[in-house]
Image (cartoon, grey):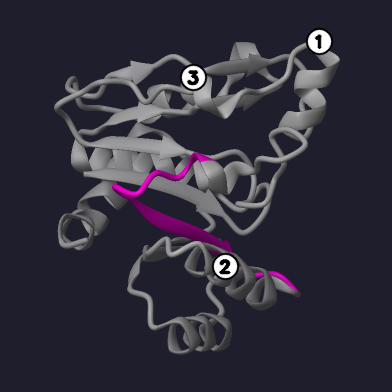
Amino acid sequence: MKLFITGIGTDVGKTIASAIVTEALEADYWKPIQAGDLEHSDSHKVKKYISNTKSVFHPNAYALHTPASPHLAAALDGIKIDVTQIKEPKTKNHLVIEGAGGVLVPLNETDCVIDLIQKDYKVIVVSRHYLGSINHTLLTVEALQHRKIKVAGIIFSGDENKATEEIILNKTGIKCIGRIDNEPYFDANVIAYYADKFRENLLTL
């Protein structure tokens, strides 16, 4: 199973969700494009949260130096992102692929993050409640469905808002994999706790 994890925006909890899914499935992890924070990247963070010994962490296809939209970060590095050169790592294990920001974040003049999603990927959308998050979640789902990409599930992150979550699930008809509370901190034990909670739903995607 190949799971592509995207968010409805930046800082919605996508990397924590990726760590939980990786731990739950003892999957491999791959972040194709990392923009900025190369010494403390999302790959570093997920690796720190993982307890199992099976997960393999595959190198970024592009490791960019500036924390910015990938198209700009690449330009500042003097390169252009070529999606045809982004090769999925070979593995016989489950693979968790973490996107960069939301699905319409630009990679270059023509391609966006959504163009990284292959036909055999199952997409998980991470949604976090804030004013406007319903709109952003529904737009994300609609953009994916417009491309004939199936959304396998939603993970809610942060403070619970039942009204928001119910309308999103009702309007989309998409399965809720689980919710990640606003924990005081995240470490390997907390990630393992959520991995146990989410595992059954993930295995039925």
Image vertical order of residue 128 relative to residue 91, above or below: below
Of residues 15 and 153, the one nearer the viewer is 153
Q: Amino acid at mark 3?
A: His
Q: Secondary structure at mark 3?
A: helix
Q: Is residue 163 above or below residue 24?
A: below
Q: Which residue is mark 3?
A: 44
Earlier residue among tags 1 and 2: 1
Q: Is residue 185 visible?
A: no
Is label 1 in contact with label 2 (beta carbons under 8 Å)?
no
Q: Position of residue 154 (x, y in %)?
A: 42, 65
Examine the rendering and report whether any part of residue 163 can be seen. Answer: yes
Q: Residue drawn at (65%, 43%), measured in percent from left and top?
A: 112
> How many numbered tags mark residues here?
3
Of mark 2 and mark 3, the one earlier in the sequence is 3
Q: Quadrant of the C terminus?
A: bottom left
* Alpha-carbon span between mark 2 and mark 3: 26 Å
Mark 1: few, some, or many residues within 10 Å (few <14, many ≥20)? Answer: few
Rendering coords of residue 36 (x, y %): 71, 21
Quarter containing the N terminus: top left
The image shows residue 37 at horizontal and vertical percentages of 68, 19
Start and end of the magenta stretch?
A: 116-131
Which residue type carries mark 1? Gly
Disc 1 target residue: 78
Mark number displayed over residue 159 = 2
The front one of 30 and 128 is 30
Residue 117 falls inside the magenta stretch: yes
Query: Horizontal placement of 66 versus 26: left or right?
Result: right
